[in-house]
Image (tube, helix red, strand yellow):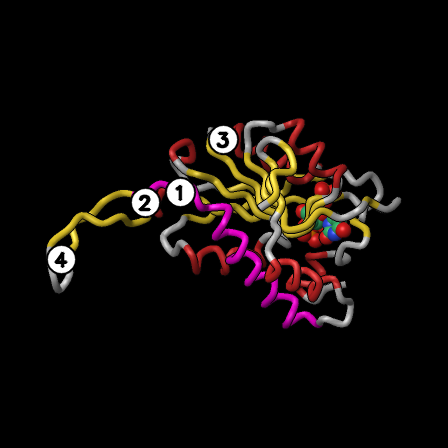
Amino acid sequence: MINYAENVYVFDHPLIKHKITMLRDKSTGTNEFRSIVEELGMLMGYEALSDLKIKYVDVETPIAKCKAPILDGRKLAIVPILRAGLGMVSGLTALVPTAKIGHIGMYRDEDTLEPHEYFCKLPNPIEERVILVVDPMLATGGSATDAINLVKSRGGIKIKFLAIIGCPEGIEKLHSMHPDIQIYIGIVDEKLNEKGYIVPGLGDAGDRIFGTK
Ligand code: PRP
Ligand code: URA
């Protein structure tokens, strides 16, 4: 992983690069797109969760008794930003089946690009958990920044953010507003266009995952 800035990490793995290229391709259909987003949730989550806490339990192997580490999985909350973040959840719960799931509903106004919150339900007690907020796209950074504001206002402390594609504008905004959180990005694209889409990006992640438009 490349250390892009303090607390900002960009993936540098050929599998992740390959799968993101498949997502970009406009001929990739909904079914395949959804599967790849799920796979990327798992591959990227594996790295982003490499500092998860473990606890020791007693285990008896066929040879001897020992104390062995297991994940303290109930301490993890996965929080997708709706809608597109939902596509990454199954890949992440495959890694940590005991994680709790929260939801933050956020949509971007197409004209102003301002995010609007329409739903928030987080598992309690949130302050004790590692909270992994996920969304495939970090564009202007407005949605992610507001989502993290919301998590913090409900008591969240140990927060990570995971996106598949980001751009310099979005990373700068999220990092400057929340320098304390760890940000993980699959790949950093060139820029935003005048409509707030990432270039070259992959288009509208929600529409491509859910087959809407
Ligand atoms: C997309 C995406 C992010 C947001 C990123 O969601 O999934 O949540 O845009 O843009 P930003 O960084 O400029 O805020 P959208 O608002 O299109 O909602 P959807 O997932 O329901 O389609
Ligand atoms: N949201 C998306 O789904 N795609 C973009 O390129 C920007 C915001």
Q: CA distance from mark 3 to mark 1?
A: 21 Å
The image position of residue 67, as x and y in percent, is: 18, 48
Residue at mark 3: C-beta within 8 A of ligand 1:
no
Q: Tell me if label 3 and label 1 are in contact, CB under 8 Å.
A: no
> The C terminus is located in which quarter?
bottom right
Picture residue at 68% right of the left edge, 50% below the top: 187
Q: Which residue is mark 2?
A: 72
The image position of residue 158, as x and y in percent, is: 46, 33
Mark closer to the observer (4, 3): 4
The image position of residue 165, as x and y in percent, is: 69, 50
Q: Which residue is mark 1?
A: 52
Pointer 4 or 2: first along the chain: 4
Q: Which residue is mark 3?
A: 154
The image position of residue 49, as x and y in percent, is: 46, 46
Quick one: SS at disc 2?
A: loop
The magenta-colored residue range is 29-54
Q: Tell me if label 2 and label 1 are in contact, CB under 8 Å.
A: yes
Mark closer to the observer (4, 2): 4
Picture residue at 32% right of the left edge, 43% below the top: 54
Judged by its main secondary structure, the magenta piece is helix
Q: Which residue is mark 4?
A: 60
Give amino acid for label 2: Asp
The residue lying toward the viewer, choosing from 12 and 108, is 12
Q: CA distance from mark 4 to mark 3?
A: 41 Å
Mark closer to the observer (3, 1): 1
